[in-house]
Amino acid sequence: MKAIGFKTSLPIAENDSFIEFDTPIPTAQGRDILVKIKAISINPVDFKIRQSGAKDTTLDTPKIIGWDASGTVEAVGDAVTLFKVGDEVYYAGDLTRSGSNAEYQLVDERIVGTKPTKLSDAEAAAMPLTALTAWESLYDRIRIDAEKDKGKSILIIGGAGGVGSIAIQLAKKISGLKVITTASRNETKEWCKAMGADLVVNHNNLIEEIRLAGYKEVDFVLDFVDLNSYWDAIVELIKPQGHIVSITGSATPIVLNKLKNKSVTFSWELMYTRSMYQTEDMEEQHRILNKMAALLDNGTLQATLKTTLKGFKVENLKEAHRLLESGKTIGKVVIEY
């Protein structure tokens, strides 16, 4: 099969930042399914691992990355119970295994969902990683309850990105929250409003703009951009006994002590935790993806695909990474095979 990978971490403009090569089609065993891929989407995790996965070294075998895909089940392992050959699926994969930048991929059935029937392959490929991240942030970390929390406020930092785009929709349409999100350009502001945001504020004047809009504090905060850059503003804006979730990590220590007087809860979210550690509830991601598929098929939620590149080739993968690295993408970037 054809695959695209890298042997050393290079700037995306370099000739060998991605290389095409042939590799054997893997064999499905156990709970693995073999998927013939039809479309993939690109996320920040892709370029971050490309930039660091082979730094100051040259790998013997190219590393295949990529963590979003849609396709058709070609073969199943002997312990598979959730899927059969011919099923249309979508998934975000597993950080510890070979990725989706290939014609075929093995993936554990427990982290795979049935593809939404009303979405194209490209639209479906845009959804898994961001949908799982947004869902887990809201419902596994904060544990938002539709009845108890309806009408409460949530600040989403980075609303126009892939995760923000689906988090806005879930918070507004499923949980009935008052959604405040950040965006600074006209096109990103309009996108956030189209996703369902009640209020869009400029991240450069976060506290001032939220206060001017009549919000002294917010019940929940989701950080999808840069936790340290916004930490002091988040600490000031979060309500006593509120909850903060971040997906961005931090190169320097977070000053959690600033949350003590307010008794605020802080959580990290990494949607790869379940697959990385083979947790007892790993199959929950299969269920979440199926719930998301139903919500997309019945029109409650809309797909967040914004840019489609045609053809599985090095040039398109480089362009997708270049777009993501710019930090200015809206919605999702997909490569359709």
Image (tube, grey):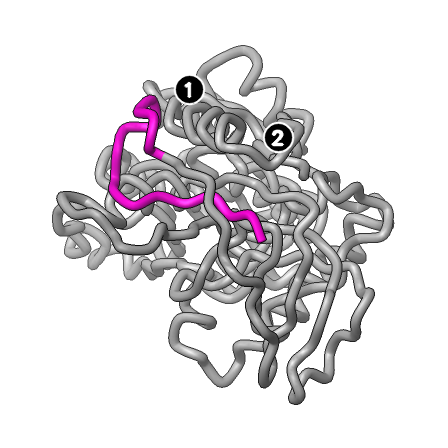
Looking at the rendered structure, the secondary structure element under dot 1 is loop
User: Residue 147: where, in percent of width, then height?
Assistant: 68, 62
Q: Quadrant of residue 139?
A: bottom right
Q: Is residue 155 visible?
A: no
Nearest the camera: 212 or 11?
A: 11
Query: On screen, 53 above or below 266?
Result: above
Looking at the rendered structure, the secondary structure element under dot 2 is loop
Q: Is residue 258 magenta?
A: no
Figure label count: 2
User: Residue 180: where, in percent of width, then height?
Assistant: 52, 33
Residue pointed to by mark 1: 202
Q: Is residue 6 magenta?
A: yes
Query: On screen, 204 above or below 196?
Result: above
Residue pointed to by mark 2: 198
User: Which stretch is magenta?
Assistant: 1-17
> Badge 1: how crowded within 10 Å, few (<14), some, or many (20+)?
some
Left or right for 37, reference 50: right
Question: Which amino acid type is marked by label 1?
Answer: Asn
**Image quarter of the C terminus:** top right
